[in-house]
Amino acid sequence: MQGKENYFPELKNSNWVCDLAFGVDILTHLNELNVNLQGKNVFVHKLYSCLTAFKAKLVLFSKQIKDKVFAHFPILKYSQVSPEQREKYSKILSDLHGEFSHQFYDFQKTEKTLELVSCPLSLDYKKAPQELQLELIDIQCDSTLKEKNNSEKQDEFYASMSETKFPNIRKVAQKIFVLFSYTCVCKQTFSLLNYNKSRYRSQLTDEHLSSILWISTTRMTLDFDAIVKKGDQLHCSH
């Protein structure tokens, strides 16, 4: 930054430089959280675990900065941080933690349910709702389900469960999986709609557009060989 003080007099102010460094570091952490909360098929229990982890990090950051430890603030650690500034930054982080706790307070009401859906094999079934206890015991003692839980995505894991044997826990999981998932689907569908229905494809009918959107947004993999075999006429030469 040498030679730029004449253009930016703020750079001569050590307090301002420290504030800038602190802002860069904390925004980096916030950006990482933002990235982790985005994406397709990220369910609410995963989002909540990311938020819970970030709140714990804020508590750690606040204490460490007060103790003059800048391990997780790589830009700030090269600045001359006064005791007053450390106290200010510690309070900012503490206030940020309080704001996160306030904004996402409602999630605490469903925390046990989120834990149940995300970790059905490790949850203490004695602490689960009575209507789920027997099903949890069956799940935790089923070696096949244990293997599926390790190899499949969680929504696929619950979809593979028998509806007759695990009706209650499947319903609970379905309620959790649909939370917020429609928002991502709607955004994706609207983006695909704008992309496909352009002036270069003016002859595209509503029926064709509907089919394109279905194919573009589905997670299912088509078995073309099976579809072809079901056809009335199969011409291999074609």
Image (spheres, rainbow, N blue to C red):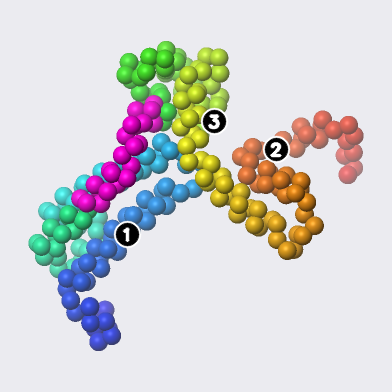
Q: Position of residue 228 (x, y in %)?
A: 81, 35
Residue drawn 43% across and 38% down?
Answer: 44
Query: Decide: marks 1, 3 in contact (CB < 8 A)?
Result: no
Which image quarter is the C terminus in? top right
Disc 2 from disc 3: Cα separation: 17 Å
Is 2 within the magenta? no
Q: Position of residue 63 (x, y in %)?
A: 16, 50
Which SS type dominates the magenta stretch? helix
Can you say whether 206 is above or below 20 in the image? above
Which image quarter is the N terminus in? bottom left
Q: Position of residue 154 (x, y in %)?
A: 49, 32
Disc 1 from disc 3: Cα separation: 35 Å
Name the residue type under label 3. Answer: Glu
The label number, if any, that marks residue 171 in the structure image: none
Does dot 1 land on a helix, a strand or a loop? helix
Name the residue type under label 2. Answer: Leu
The residue labelled by disc 1 is: 27
Q: Residues within 10 Å of mark 1 (few under 14, many from 20)?
A: few
Q: Residues within 10 Å of mark 3 (few under 14, many from 20)?
A: few
Residue drawn 36% across and 31% down?
Answer: 110
The residue labelled by disc 2 is: 222
Residue drawn 53% across and 46% down?
Answer: 184
The residue labelled by disc 3 is: 156
Does dot 2 land on a helix, a strand or a loop? loop
- What range of the chain is rendered magenta? 94-116
Is 114 within the magenta? yes
